Image: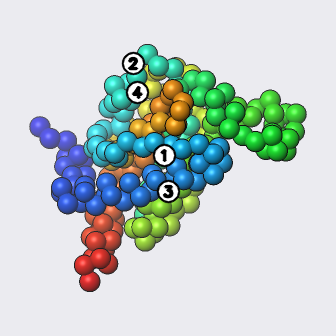
């Protein structure tokens, strides 16, 4: 039997194509902002759209991220007509690699305590940049605005994603917009997810139609 919530969140192929193109633009915008901070090219995969129950997220992540890989997970919630959560997963130790891209002047601006917390802070800041720029661009293209909660670090290691279920209404169905990315000349990959629930679907469907009509008129 089909999940009625999943049925409510179904998109036509045209709607998926439009949303995927918007995601391409948004993810590209996000990585451009990140490149300004750490001066490194970020290579994106083609964005993918999935619809699933929140309880399926841990298994999905375990299958999407390399099996057994320890990851750091950060996230940020956003609210408005476009309502949901951004999640960023980076392999454990990535913060030490990314720290090398910070200039000496950036390090010099940090206090002793800030320097001690720099690696953790860098993960949160990268999450803030990627999620904020991505969600912000989607919102701009779909003619709406959102507000954000502060980014937070969920875990600095592990490959068990069950902890995410504490942060979501597990009765809901998620629209998962994901892209895998790689830092140029660095041997690690990340995963960026934009999750929104079925409460945003009616708005999103209308917004996608309005987005296309501006090019057809």
Residue at the location (42% across, 43% down)? 44
Asked if the residue at tag 2 contacts the one at tag 4, i.e. Cβ–Cβ closer than 8 Å, the answer is yes
| In front: label 4 or label 3 | 3
Which of the numbered marks, if any, corresponds to residue 67?
2
Q: For label 1, count other residues whose C-alpha is less than 10 Å away and answer few (under 14), some (14-19) or many (20+).
A: many
Asked if the residue at tag 1 contacts the one at tag 2, i.e. Cβ–Cβ closer than 8 Å, the answer is no
Does label 4 or label 1 sit earlier along the sequence?
Answer: 4
Q: Position of residue 149 (x, y in %)?
A: 59, 51
Between residue 168 and residue 156, name the one nearer to us. 156
- Quarter of the image holding residue 74? top right
Q: CA distance from mark 2 to mark 1?
A: 22 Å
Q: Position of residue 153 (x, y in %)?
A: 61, 35
| In front: label 3 or label 2 | 3
Residue at the location (59% across, 48% down)? 35
Which of the numbered marks, if any, corresponds to residue 65?
4
Does label 2 or label 1 sit earlier along the sequence?
Answer: 2
Q: Position of residue 80 (x, y in %)?
A: 47, 62
Asked if the residue at tag 2 contacts the one at tag 3, i.e. Cβ–Cβ closer than 8 Å, the answer is no
Residue at the location (19% across, 41% down)? 3
Q: Position of residue 155 (x, y in %)?
A: 58, 28
Residue 105 as seen in the image, left or right of residue 195 = right
Residue 40 as seen in the image, left or right of residue 211 = right
Res. 89 visible in picture: no
Which of the numbered marks, if any, corresponds to residue 29?
3
Asked if the residue at tag 3 contacts the one at tag 4, i.e. Cβ–Cβ closer than 8 Å, the answer is no
Residue lying at the far top of the rendered structure: 68
Residue lying at the far right of the rendered structure: 112
| In front: label 3 or label 1 | 3
* 9 in relation to 64, above or below: below
């Amino acid at each position: 039997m089909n999940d009625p919530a999943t049925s409510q969140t179904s998109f036509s192929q045209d709607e998926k194509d439009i949303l995927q193109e918007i995601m391409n633009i948004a993810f590209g915008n996000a990585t451009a902002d990140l490149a300004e901070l750490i001066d490194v090219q970020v290579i994106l995969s083609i964005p993918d759209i999935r619809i699933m129950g929140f309880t399926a997220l841990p298994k999905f992540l375990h299958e999407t991220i390399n099996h057994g890989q320890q990851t750091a997970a950060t996230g940020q919630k956003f609210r408005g007509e476009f309502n949901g959560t951004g999640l960023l997963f980076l392999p454990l130790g990535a913060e030490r690699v990314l720290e090398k891209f910070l200039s000496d002047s950036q390090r010099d601006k940090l206090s002793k305590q800030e320097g001690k917390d720099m690696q953790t802070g860098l993960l949160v800041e990268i999450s803030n940049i990627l999620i904020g720029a991505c969600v912000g661009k989607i919102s701009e293209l779909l003619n709406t605005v959102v507000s954000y909660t502060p980014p937070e670090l969920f875990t600095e290691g592990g490959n068990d994603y069950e902890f995410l279920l504490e942060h979501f209404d597990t009765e809901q169905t998620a629209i998962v917009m994901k892209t895998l990315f790689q830092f140029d000349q660095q041997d690690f990959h990340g995963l960026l997810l934009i999750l929104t629930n079925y409460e945003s679907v009616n708005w999103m469907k209308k917004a996608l139609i309005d987005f296309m009509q501006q090019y057809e008129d």
